[in-house]
Amino acid sequence: MIAFAVFVLFCMKYIWPPLMNAIEARQKKIADGLSASDRAEKDLALAQDKAKDQLKDAKVQAAEIIDQARKREAKLIDEAVAKANAEREVILAHAKAEVEAERNRLREDLRKQVAALAVAGAEKILQRSIDEAAHADILEKLVQEL
């Protein structure tokens, strides 16, 4: 029994303190590891929340950019349509002016031809020549009436 007591005393003096220190160090490492794990989980949750928020913000910004692009597209289309309509109106006005000028020219040509035919017909009817210079006012009146 004395040997047992010596053994216990020897163990308590030389073996027990380093063993307790090792156990305490191991417990501290485990506690630190658990604490670090908890912090890492919290950091991960925060990072995931932040990533979700950033993703939501990115989606909102993308939707805004798409909306702006659609508005710009509609504006460009409206501008192109307005420009095309303005060009069409200019072309139509020019064409109408050309048609009117051609119509007036043809009317004038037709009046001259009718006047010449009237003079020729009158000459044949009267069997004599009508002096155009002398009767210019009569011919002008005739052209105006036609």
Image: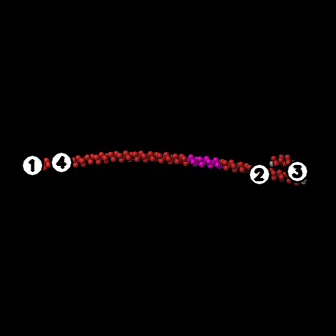
Query: Which residue is the site of mark 1?
Result: 2
Query: Which residue is more in the foreground, 126 or 20?
Result: 20
**Whole-Å distance between the Cαs marked 3 and 4?**
155 Å
Q: Is residue 55 left or right of residue 13?
A: right
Query: Which residue is more in the foreground, 39 or 140?
Result: 39
**Count of labels shown?**
4
* Tag of residue 16: 4
The amino acid on which the numbered mark 4 sits, given as a three-letter code, is Trp
Q: Are marks 2 and 1 in contact (CB under 8 Å)?
A: no
Say whether residue 50 is visible. Answer: yes
Q: Is residue 128 left or right of residue 26?
A: right
Q: Secondary structure at mark 4?
A: helix
Magenta-tinted stretch: 74-88
Rendered residue at 49%/45% (across/down): 64
**Whole-Å distance between the Cαs marked 2 and 1?**
149 Å
Q: Are marks 2 and 3 in contact (CB under 8 Å)?
A: no
**Whole-Å distance between the Cαs marked 4 and 1?**
19 Å
Query: Which residue is the site of mark 2?
Result: 106
Q: Secondary structure at mark 2?
A: helix
**Whole-Å distance between the Cαs marked 2 and 3?**
26 Å
Q: Residue furthest left?
A: 1
The amino acid on which the numbered mark 3 sits, given as a three-letter code, is Asp
Query: Which residue is the site of mark 3?
Result: 131
The amino acid on which the numbered mark 2 sits, given as a three-letter code, is Leu
The prevailing secondary structure element of the residues shown in magenta is helix
The amino acid on which the numbered mark 1 sits, given as a three-letter code, is Ile
Indicate the colouring scheme.
Answer: secondary structure
Please tell me how crowded label 4 is: few (under 14), some (14-19), or many (20+) other residues with Cα within 10 Å: some
Which of the marked residues, 2 or 1, is nearer the chain's N terminus? 1
Rendered residue at 61%/47% (across/down): 82
